[in-house]
Amino acid sequence: MNTPVKKADLLNAAERLFYEHGFRGVGLKQIISEANVATMTLYNHFSSKEHLVEEVLKQREERYWSYLDALVQDEIETPFLSAVEAHGKWLAEESYQGDMFLRAIEDYSGANNDIENIARSHKSRLLRYFQMLAKRIGEDDHSDLAHYFTLLLEGTTSMTTLIGVEKATEYAMAMAKRIVY
């Protein structure tokens, strides 16, 4: 098996385990076992568990933005509604047990600035994304609209653990329609 495949196996196993059990609840031995690689393979790619966490977060963020952009980028009339719908689909498929980025902020706040910075940057990027959408449709008050929708998506993510993805997304879509109409 070639090196990029082994690295991908490590990242995928680590992401799944971190998501299911938390960053602190998973050791490197478990990741190595789940990825079915040698210990040296892990250390050839990642100098520490923290470096692995950083790369997992970067991979997850890249996947999130690719997912969101693919469903929103060509939408001209209702990009905000498309973004809420896309986020709901992401939650159903990839983030049904809460937000990995918020977990990273909680677990690594003050302990590892790189991990915390990656996670916080993801949240800031969401706000900038909605500002860009608001400007694209010619919204005068793009800052307020961006904050509304960032809060809406963050709230939707949080509520999935309480009421489920389907219901949280349903409420989010209803709120989004009230905001833009």
Image: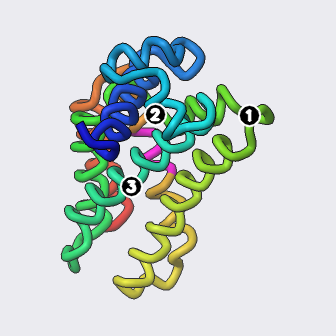
Cα distance, mark 2 to mark 1? Answer: 15 Å
Q: Decide which of 50, 147 is in the foreground and name it.
A: 50
Q: Give the range drawn in magenta.
A: 151-156
Residues packed near mark 2 inside 10 Å, few (<14), some (14 to 19) or many (20 plus): some
Give the labeled residue for mark 2.
Answer: 99
On the rendered structure, is 36 left or right of 129? left
Q: Which circle's residue, 2 or 3, is located before the other in the chain?
A: 3
Q: Which circle's residue, 2 or 1, is located before the other in the chain?
A: 2
Mark 2 is on which residue type? Asp
Give the labeled residue for mark 3.
Answer: 62
Q: Is residue 7 above or below residue 145?
A: above
Nearest to the eye among marks 2 and 3: give it. 3
Q: Decide which of 158, 33 is in the foreground and name it.
A: 33
Residue under the image location 40 percent in, 20 percent down? 17
Cα distance, mark 1 to mark 3? Answer: 22 Å
Cα distance, mark 2 to mark 3? Answer: 15 Å
SS label for mark 3 = helix
Q: Which circle's residue, 1 or 3, is located before the other in the chain?
A: 3
Q: Image quadrant for the N terminus?
A: top left
Q: Is residue 173 above or below residue 36?
A: below
Residues packed near mark 3 inside 10 Å, few (<14), some (14 to 19) or many (20 plus): few
**Visible in this render: residue 135?**
yes
